[in-house]
Amino acid sequence: MSQFRAASGGRIDRATSLRFTFDGRAYTGARGDTLASALLANGVHLVGRSFKYHRPRGIVGAGSDEPNALVALSRDAARVTPNMRATMIELYEGLRAESQNRFPSLAFDLGAVNDLLAPLLPAGFYYKTFKWPASWWKRVYEPLIRAAAGLGRAPTLPDPDRYTARWAHADVLVAGAGPAGIAAALVAAEAGARVFLVDEQSEFGGSLLAEDAATIEGKPARDWLADSLATLAANPRVTLLPRATAFGYFAHNMIGVSERVTDHLADPPPHLPRERLWQVRARRVVLATGALERPLVFPNNDRPGIMLADAARIYLSRYGVVPGKRIVVATACDSAYRAALDLRAAGVTIAAIADLRESPDRALLEQARARDIPVRMQTAVAGTGGGRRVTWARLAPLGGGEAERVACDALLMSGGWTPAVHLFSQSRGALRYDLDAQAYLPHKAAEQELSAGACRGVFGLAEALESGARAGEAAAAAIAATGRAAGRGFAVTGGEHGGGGWLGLAPNGQAGKAFVDFQNDVTAKDIRLAVREGMRSIEHIKRYTTTGMATDQGKTSNMNALGIASAALEATIPEIGHTTFRMPYTPVTFGALAGIARGDLFEPVRRTPIHAWAAERGAVFEDVGQWKRARYFPREREGMREAVARECRAVRQAVGVFDASTLGKIEVVGADAAEFLNRLYVNSWSKLGVGRCRYGILCREDGFVRDDGVVGRLAPDRFHVTTTTGGAAGVLAMMEDYAQTEWPGLDVWLTSTTEQWAVIAVQGPRARDVIAPLVEGLDVSRAAFPHMAVAECVFAGVPARLFRVSFTGELGFEVNVPAGFGRAVWEAIVASGQPHGITPYGTEAMHVLRAEKGYIIVGQDTDGTATPDDAGLGWAVAKAKPDFVGKRSLARAAMRGPDRKQFVGLLTEDPAVVLEEGAQLVADAAAAASVPMALLGHVTSSYFSPILGRSIALAMVKGGRGRIGTRLYVPMPTGTVPVTLCSPIFHDEKGARLDD
């Protein structure tokens, strides 16, 4: 047995030995150990190197607040996880861990030279150093910074593990399973509430797991804990989630919980996910997240072997591990005395207790002296010594006098306790600073939440249980639970939590590096320097020094930083405030957040009913949003340009068939359907006749074009609305938002029918000849079924909606049939069109054809800053309508300025030159060669038109319509290209072919 394993005690299974390696060296631990406790049991304190100075670092804490002991775990080449906290890693057989941020080894790290260069690397040196010479940034500075960034190395192979997600509802969610959390869960469950109890540890109990002396309801604390957990587990309305971190508090009581399902297993079952992301919506939330012990800030307080006092007590009580054989305790808090007394009872020599205060708890003081523990009042640690582990501490009286060097192999420190208010603050709750607690406490809740126990400044065991019980009772009462919860109390003996504390730099701590943020190597001197250099906001001080920006997110450093900054600013802590508590509470893996959305499931692939037909004929597909769309249909040795040219000519000269099923389709139904569309779209809909269509434009509230599409009126109370392919979900969401929140009195309901209808566009001079034989019950002649008509009919034996519309400028029909009949109807159209030379065409030809007609594509020819008039669609805006979404914004003078970018066409002098989409336009050739250049606009679409035999382009240009006929210039990689502005309509400007 290791010399640092206590002879008895702890919750580990001493009979089961587990083998593991750290930096390639073999060790053994016991079942129930964490990696941190197993390393300490083997006498290993040096576990890493700090980020900036590469100083030796050891284990500081025992939980998720650990700032130093970050390791990389590797099960195999593909399963490598960096930056894991050794304190939260459950030991399993064969575990392999590696230290980080060192080269060539942990014991001998060349990066430690940075410690010698510390005077050249003060806080903010990045901002002062990497400015000159400017030419060095790309060649020297940036590569060096990128090489030095980070601690662990990111894995390079795809993650083979599986992650899942679950959604749940609860009456009461309790975050934290310490005494307050368990009491709250018990009381709420007794009242009949559905309860979720979540805790980040592998075992529920919190501080009770290390409680040996207290009794609750006449039972030893650990027995009471076991009985309480058994009661909760037997209740079918209670869900217990250990190894689950409540990492985020979102709006309306949504709690994000990351559950580690198999990380603790040596051979995880393949059917289980590695992690599970819970999204729990709770009617009431009880926060029982406890408190975090603060380090003391004194010179060289970062050596391996220096740790938090309560962490040492936890290692002894839960894992049967002592951190050293001869220990010095430095404290400003009574709770450290309990750690010293427990370690002394385990046979450890306590060389001294150095207390910054004048009068600690008298009973604890007498107990310490009764066990021959030297106690030195008003004494500070003025320095420490040792290389890879602390070997001595210099203790100095505060009132003057000679300092004494005391030999030790571990030093325990306690600067008091900081309530863990992270989740409360994330919920937008307001905090207040409590002078007695020397910490921020919950003040005004913003959600349906109650805080209990140490996280609200209630530290004693009896008080914590009472606080939790009252929170559980209040939560149950608020949801009108029917059971009995009132009056539940807990009789407690022992378990007192010591008071006191210290913020900021300890006295006699002026010489040497006194670290505030261990991982980022931020010292008290750095914080004072930031104040001297003009930082007044605590957020600025944080960023200038990187205090609180390590992986522990300031859990061990923020309050001490506030204490030092307030002294330097000569202001109180409430006056300077606190930094923002951002989620996640502890790091969450990308795998947990992504869940199953990886690889092919990253974004669902949507295929139209005609997809298989196109694939069988060699179509080349492109991704348009989530859809796979046929881009072109090459024949034999055709490239894209040849295939597109052939397809365009077929549509213009004969007939083409196009799969338009991806268009968004929304059914707007109800007595007020027309009024609803009137209020949304810029067009007028009240007088649109049944059986007619209209091109509609939808704006945002700021007056800029959001979407467009053809809207057909099928009945007085029914409209078929089409949207762009990518805009379907957003338009439906906008419609639902306005229907439910702005105009709830309107009789209208909305249904997405995008995937219910297959849409087949038949376009070209022979289009009517192709569809006429397939239509039943409808005259599709020019006179009977004019352009922009819609009707329900039977098409190829299938119920259909037939639209007479065109996005090519040719005679066109769009056949809408139920998706299940899409391919059959497509094949019928192709068969009917064979005598007429029908040709399938793809999205690339569609783009060329629409550009020849000057039809815009929202999102390509518009960029979110174009009004209908900018896009050349001012004719569509109903001037007489009293209101529509965006109307007031369009009335602003700035929206009608002559210099606004307007939609125009471009012709290059050399007809063979195709401009790059996104290329900029300038006034003259000289401007094209100057940097910076005055930009007049940009190219939105650019193609080679096989019909016109030349290149064409569309653009948004400042005052574009007034510049038609003038020359501008387009800087291109191959040189400056002169262009002439023209009408955006290049083909059939009068639209005669539409009415053929």
Image (spheres, rainbow, N blue to C red):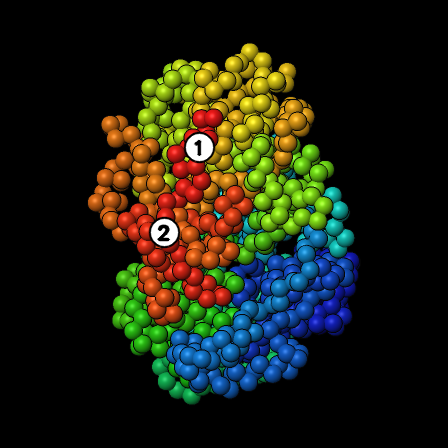
The residue carrying mark 1 is 709
- Quadrant assignment, res 970: bottom left
- Judged from this view, the residue extending furthest toward the top is 777
Q: In front: mark 2 or mark 1?
A: 2
Q: Amino acid at mark 1?
A: Gly
Quadrant where the image shows the N terminus: bottom right
Task: Find out whether the residues at labels 2 and 1 contact each other: C-beta distance under 8 Å.
Answer: no
User: Which residue is painted at 24% across and 27% down in the image?
Assistant: 880
Looking at the rendered structure, the secondary structure element under dot 1 is strand
Count of numbered tags: 2
Q: Position of residue 144 (x, y in %)?
A: 53, 77
User: Which residue is painted at 69% across and 43% down in the image?
Assistant: 635
Q: Is residue 372 above or below residue 133?
A: above
**Is 379 left, or right, of 430 in this rendering?**
right
Pick whichever, 893 or 342, lies toward us: 893
Instruction: Report, in whole angstroms, how far the alpha carbon at label 2 lies from the one at label 1.
Output: 27 Å
Q: Amino acid at mark 2?
A: Leu
Q: Is residue 454 above or below residue 316?
A: above
Instruction: Kindly tell me whether residue 581 is visible in this rendering.
Output: no
Pointer 2 or 1: first along the chain? 1
Q: Is residue 38 above or below residue 839?
A: below
The residue carrying mark 2 is 981
Q: Position of residue 104 (x, y in %)?
A: 66, 80
Looking at the rendered structure, the secondary structure element under dot 2 is strand
Pick whichever, 106 or 821, lies toward us: 821
Q: Is residue 93 above or below residue 296?
A: above
Pick whichever, 248 or 751, lies toward us: 751
User: Which residue is painted at 56% across and 40% down in the image?
Assistant: 648
> Which mark, residue 219?
none
User: Which residue is painted at 76% across and 59% down in the image?
Assistant: 93
Q: Position of residue 488 (x, y in %)?
A: 48, 36
